[in-house]
Structures are given as C-alpha cells and as structure tokens.
Image (spheres, rainbow, N blue to C red):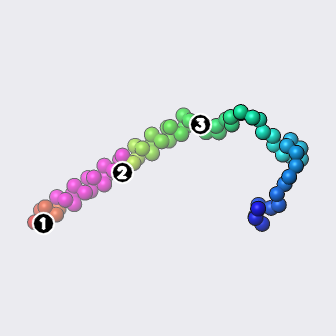
Amino acid sequence: VSQNSGPAEVGAPGSGGRGTLIAGALESSNVDLAREFTELITHQRGFEASARVIRAGDEVLQTVVNIKQ
C-alpha cells in the first residue's frame, strides 16, 4: 500500500463495485492474434532488410579497406 495506490479496500466480493472470482475459469485474451502475427511478419521483414543493408555496407567497407592495402 502506498500513497499513490490509496488505502486497501476490504469487503465482500460482488458488493460495492468489487468483482467476483470464478474457480477454474480462464480469462479471454484481448489480443487479435491475426493482427499481431501480421505485425510480427512486417517487423521481421523490416529487420531482415536492415540486416541486408548493414551487410552490404560492411562489404563495401571491407572492399575499401582491401583497395587501400
């Protein structure tokens, strides 16, 4: 308990705006899996593109170093 969280509230479940518990129940997900997988693929492709750019830059730098020698 902190000043930001306020005082603890004690009372009967289901009264005074308090929720209730259901034994053995599972909470439904609030995530759209299709959307999340689509975003994952998009970000993965962006990462792969960035890695290719870095690899190409590294190859150019290596070529410049080899020319200088």
Q: Quadrant of residue 15?
A: top right
Residue 68 has which mark? 1
Rendered location of residue 47, percent (x, y): 39, 48
Q: Which structural element holds mark 1?
A: helix
Labels 2 and 1 touching (C-beta < 8 A):
no
Q: Which structural element holds mark 2?
A: helix
Disc 2 packing (10 Å; few <14; some 14–19; many ≥20): few
Residue shown at 31% from the left, 49% from the top: 52
Quadrant for the N terminus, please. bottom right
Task: Report whether 22 appears left or right of 29.
Answer: right
The amino acid sitting under disc 1 is: Lys
2, above or below 50, in the image: below
In three-dimensional space, the C-alpha distance between marks 1 and 3, rounded to whole angstroms, equals: 54 Å
| Residue 31 within the segment the image draws in magenta | no
Q: Observer-nearest residue: 11 or 53?
A: 11
Foreground label between 1 and 3: 3
Nearer-N-terminus badge (2/1): 2
45, above or below 34, in the image: below
Question: Which residue has dot 2 on it?
Answer: 50
Q: Quadrant of residue 34?
A: top right
Nearer-N-terminus badge (3/2): 3
Disc 1 packing (10 Å; few <14; some 14–19; many ≥20): few
Rendered location of residue 68, percent (x, y): 12, 66
Residue shown at 75% from the left, 35% from the top: 23
Q: Which residues make up the magenta segment?
A: 48-63
Question: Which residue has dot 3 on it?
Answer: 32
